Structure formats: structure tokens, C-alpha cells
Amino acid sequence: MPALKHPMLRIAPVSDEVYAVSDLLISALSRQRIWLFDLEATGLDTSKERVTQIAGCMFENGQIREETAFTSFVWPGEGVEIPKVVRELTGITPEKLQGAPAFPEAWRSHLAAARGADFWLGQSVFEFDVPLLEAEFARHRMVSELPATLDSVVLATWLLGPPEERWSTSKLLNRFSVDTVGLRRHDALDDVKILGRLLQPMLRLASEERGDRLELPPDPPLFIKRHPPIKEGA
């Protein structure tokens, strides 16, 4: 993970297992308008894979605002393949992407849907979604339009302490006993709704135990356990 110039906080690599975050202050955390978002892609290598789905939804006053939900498939380009394992995981096939907008158009529509949010939040976005977006911006010669964004792994580590491994979605679902009946993992919009269900108890806990104030000082920074390296062919 390279050092990222980020509009919301400081992110710095430490090792292959850990990165550090600092220089963040959010008062009245539970009163923020938060845009929850997620991406699906053709694979996990953020330097070369293409976005195939974008989804988001506003979270406000402790609730997911379903009426604000946005989702769009994304045409990855002619000749871009989706490996079988990815098709099976996400349910996204080349046939489903026929006629979908290219990334620049889909991204502009997503930005318009997210207008008015205080900041964005996604799961593992500092390791996956953010570098994937930066690669798409560069590929399409777009001005980088990354908004103020927070990773829910950072939020969980600040709130709950460092886990034995990392705060994956599965670990957080178990920690808060969140029901995901009716929602499909690895569908971008359903993943957004799952994150919303996780955010509800997290914000309640932050309000009760942390004074509803998220603060990451410059020193010491908060160390975040990274996702284990993806093995070739996995």
C-alpha cells in the first residue's frame, strides 16, 4: 500500500501486515450524513482490474435511507474477461454488463447520488476500492474525484481494538450478531445494506463509550491490520 494523499485523514504504510491512520477528528459522529458505498470488479489486483458494479446509499439518523439507494453495472471495456471464480462469487457475467455505462458515466451518476454526504464509508476501501478507483481515474484520464472517505475497518479498530486477525465483514457480523437474511454478499448494493446494518450498533457504541467523537491523533497513530495477501489462483 503506497502512502495516500487523502482528503480526510493521513494514511501511511508500515509493513505488509499493517498500515497506520492518523490526523482525523469527527465530532457528533452519529449525526453525520454518511454515504455507504461498495464496488465489484473483475478481480482483486487493483492495478489492472476493472470496476463492474458501483452501489451506494445514504445513512442518516441511525438509519439506511433506502430511497437514496444507487446501483449501476459498469461496462469494463471490450475484451475484458471476468474469471469464472469472480462470476460465481458476484453473480456478474459479461451478459449482465452489456449496455451498461462505462466507468466515467457511471461514476458521475454515483457522485450525483451521493451529493450532500458529510463523508463516505466502505469496508476495506483503503486496501481495495480507493486504489481501484485511482487506477480507473488514471485509465480514463479523469480528474481524481475521491471524496472524504473512511474505512469501516478503521472505525471498527478504533472502536473495538485490534482483533486477532482483522475486522472483516464476517467478524463484525458475528461481533454484533447482525442478521443478513435476504441480502447477498458480493452484490454491491446488498453489501452496502449489510454495512448499514453493521454501522447501527457501531455508532450506538461510539456514542455510549466514546462520547460520539472519533479522534485519531497524529501521535500515536492507529495501526490497522491489513487483509492477508491474495495467493495466486485463490
Image (tube, helix red, strand yellow):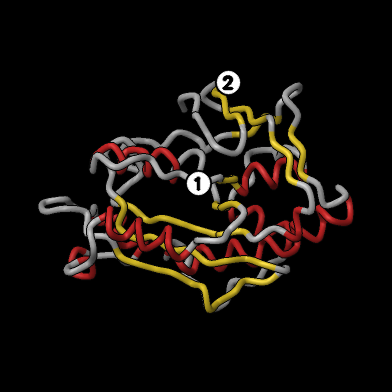
Q: Is residue 113 left or right of residue 19?
A: left
- Say which element carries label 2: loop
CB atoms of marks 2 and 1 within 8 Å: no
Image coordinates for residue 30, horizontal then vertical, percent: 76, 59
x and y percentages locating residue 84 in the rendered image: 24, 56
Q: What type is the residue that disc 1 sits on?
A: Pro
Q: Which quadrant holds the C terminus? A: top left
Image coordinates for residue 165, horizontal then vertical, percent: 64, 38
Image quadrant assignment for residue 145: top left
User: Residue shown at 11%/53% (left/top)?
Assistant: 78
Q: Which mark is residue 14?
A: 2
The one of 10 and 20 positioned closer to us in this rendering: 10
Name the residue carrying label 1.
Answer: 147
Against 135, is 221 above or below? above
Circle 2: residue type: Val
Secondary structure of the residue carrying tag 1 is loop
